[in-house]
Structure formats: C-alpha cells, structure tokens
Image (cartoon, rainbow, N blue to C red):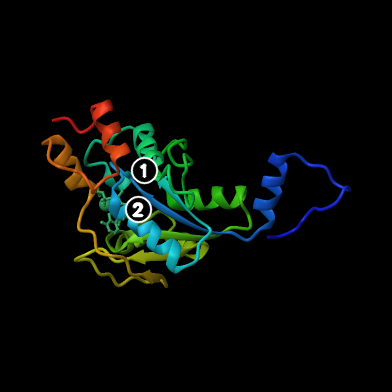
Amino acid sequence: MINVFQGEHLSISANSTTLVASILMDMRVGILGGTFDPIHIGHLIAASSVYESLSLDSVVFMPAGDPWQKRDRELSAGHHRLEMARLAISDDARFSASDLEINRSGPTYAIDTVREWKQLNPADELFWIVGSDALSGIPSWHEWEAFVSEVTVVAVNRIGQSASVPFNYASVEMPEVRISATELRDRFTHKMDTQYLVPRKVSDYISDQGLYQA
Ligand code: ATP
Ligand code: MG
C-alpha cells in the first residue's frame, strides 16, 4: 500500500485517485496475446501459472484485431472473441480483457500494443506471455527487436514445441494442456463434448451466437 496523497490538502475524486495510483505504482502486468477463437483452459492455465510464478499484479487477455499471420482462415469477429475472453475471466479478479487491439485498425502488431500500453500506464513493467509455438514465431513479428527490448517475453511450455530464439526470455512451467482453439472449433462444429475444455459461460455464448457452425 502506497500512501501517495493523504490528509486534507488534496481532494481528488475516486477516478483520479485510481489514475494517479496506476501511474505511480510499479505494476507487473502480464499480457497474453492471441486470437482466442475461442478462449480455452490452455490460455487460462497459462495465465494463471505465469501470474503465480512471476508474482504479477494482473494478467491482461489481449485478443488481436487483425492477426495478419493468420489470414489463411476466417476469424470470428473481434467483438465475439473479446466477449468470450471477458466471460471466461469474469470470476477471476487477477485477470482482465482489453479491447486495445480489437479497436485498432490495420494489421495487429504487438509492438504498437506495447507502446500504446506504456503511454497509458508508464510505470507498468510488461511481461508478454506466449506458448512455445508462438515464441519461435516472434522473430517474424513487425519490429520484433524493439518489441523484445520493451517487454520481458515469457514462454510457457506447450507440448511438442521447443524453440531456440535470438533473444532472452523467461520460461514458466505449466501443467500440459494438449488442446488448441483449432481443435475446439472442430469440436463445436461437430457438436462434440467441450465440457472442462472451455468455461461453461463461453460454450453457452458460442451456442447462443451460433459460432463455429458447419
Ligand atoms: P489456434 O489453434 O487457433 O492457433 P490456439 O489454441 O493456439 O489457437 P491462440 O489464440 O493462437 O490459441 O493462442 C494464444 C497464445 O496462447 C499463444 O501464445 C499460444 O501459444 C498460447 N496457447 C494456446 N493454447 C495453449 C496451450 N494449450 N498451452 C499453452 N499455451 C497455449
Ligand atoms: Mg495458436
């Protein structure tokens, strides 16, 4: 607890108190980027494992607006992917979901997200969380060298994937969850069981909205 403003000298509203606190306090913030089409327990366990291992203050789920490296298939609309992320984390105060990338036009570059985040929250220390498959792709990202100098990259293990990359990163072990959104889309399309693989609120949303129909 930091007592920045005390006593009768300053009277500031709750909103500005929150703003001042977030500017002055050094927060350790994890960002988990992805398409989240849909979000699943692999993402949630990864976020939880990194939160705990690195003593983070929060983890932000950041659905990509236009993941330009995934243009080979049609994505669900950004608002659906964001809403599924929001529903998945709604009972967990450690987590939040951001619309920063969904609301930005043009191809989604993580470096833009990092710069925008730091402008809004200059005191935050950022930890960019990736599975080991995404880790090996980072050198193909736009301005990747600037990106890896602005954040600590954190790789969580993903089965069958290992990487050697030209930058330093932190590793966090997580219980192996051998599922992907690709497999889940297929399960939803074929009306197979998805219990325990995605939170119930997310599967209810998917059926209400008719996502992943054949
Ligand atoms: P898709 O099959 O559509 O690529 P995905 O399951 O890989 O979906 P993404 O949204 O691409 O999900 O992943 C976002 C991030 O989460 C990536 O860094 C990815 O490596 C990581 N991730 C996804 N699933 C797992 C998992 N089961 N275990 C560990 N990390 C995961
Ligand atoms: Mg993926």
Q: Position of residue 209 (x, y in %)?
A: 28, 26
How many angstroms separate mark 2 from mark 1 (CA)? 8 Å
The answer to the question of whether label 2 and label 1 lie on touching residues, with beta carbons closer than 8 A, is yes
Location of residue 82 (image quadrant): top left
Up-down: is 43 above or below 36? Answer: below
Q: Position of residue 31 (x, y in %)?
A: 45, 54
Up-down: is 87 above or below 24? Answer: above
Mark 2 closeness class: few <14, some 14–19, many ≥20 residues within 10 Å = some
Judged from the image, the secondary structure of the residue bearing numbered disc 2 is helix
For label 2, the residue is: 44
Up-down: is 153 above or below 204? Answer: below
Amino acid, disc 1: Ala
Judged from the image, the secondary structure of the residue bearing numbered disc 1 is helix
Say which residue appears at 43% left-offset and 42% top-offset: 90
Up-down: is 200 above or below 179? Answer: above
Say which residue appears at 46% left-offset and 39% top-offset: 99
- Identify which residue, 147 or 158, lies in the foreground: 158
Q: Quadrant of the C terminus?
A: top left
For label 1, the residue is: 88
Q: Is residue 18 shown left or right of residue 151?
A: right
Amino acid, disc 2: Leu
Q: Quadrant of the N terminus?
A: bottom right
Mark 1 closeness class: few <14, some 14–19, many ≥20 residues within 10 Å = many
- Identify which residue, 161 or 38, lies in the foreground: 38
Q: Position of residue 109 (x, y in %)?
A: 42, 48
